[in-house]
Amino acid sequence: MNKAELIDAMAAGANLSKADAKKALDAFVDATSGALKGGDRVALVGFGSFSVSTRAARIGRNPQTGKEISIPAKKVVKFKAGADLSKIIK
């Protein structure tokens, strides 16, 4: 499902216009992004939670040459599915 399909599904499921569904989705993405950027965790009970984790620096290999390269530490977004979502997809 891409963004346009999600907007269509939200509009149909909540009886909204596509424009309102797009605004709601954009607001959710902006609010979630802002919270994660600030180091907060976003938890949606039953659905799951988004958090920021730091991946340690490590040594990797260039697959073309086999030469070792240094991969710097970085922050990554993680999603952990909630119990209700996990039950649905089993």
Image (spheres, helix red, strand yellow):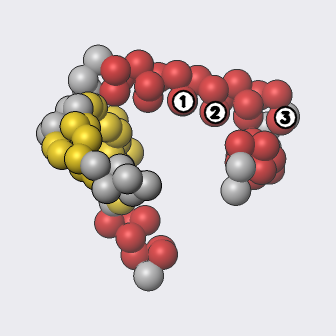
Q: Which mark is first along the chain, 2 or 3?
A: 3
Name the residue that disc number 3 marks. Answer: 17
Tag 3, which secondary structure?
A: loop
- Which of the two discs, 3 and 2, sits closer to the camera? 2
Tell me: 33 left or right of 20.
left
Which quadrant of the structure image shows residue 87?
bottom left
Instruction: Quote the CA–CA distance across marks 1 and 2.
Output: 5 Å
Kind of residue indicated by mark 3: Ser
Contact flag, marks 1 and 2 (Cβ < 8 Å)? yes
What amino acid type is highlighted by mark number 1? Phe
Which residue corresponds to the image point at 31% horizontal and 37% vertical from the top-left? 76
Tag of residue 10:
none
Residue 74, given in percent of the width and then of the height, sits at 26, 31
Residue identifier under label 2:
25
Q: Nearer the viewer, residue 88 or 40?
A: 40
**Circle 1/circle 3 CB separation < 8 Å:** no
Say which residue appears at 44% left-offset and 82% top-offset.
Answer: 90
Quarter of the view holding residue 84? bottom left
* Relative depth, front residue between 47 and 54: 54
At 38% from the left edge and 45% from the top edge, which residue is drawn? 44
Which quarter of the figure is the N terminus placed in?
bottom right
Residue with the most extreme bottom position = 90
Does 47 sit left or right of 83 as displayed?
Answer: right
Q: CA distance from mark 3 to mark 2?
A: 12 Å
Q: How many marks?
A: 3
Residue at position x 73%, y 34% from top? 21
Neighbourhood count class around disc 2 (C-alpha, 10 Å): few under 14, some 14–19, many 20 upward: some
Amino acid type, residue under disc 2 in the picture? Leu
- Mark 3, Cα crowd under 10 Å, few <14 / some 14-19 / many 20+, is some
Judging by the rendered image, the residue that carries numbered circle 1 is 28
Q: Position of residue 26 (x, y in %)?
A: 63, 26
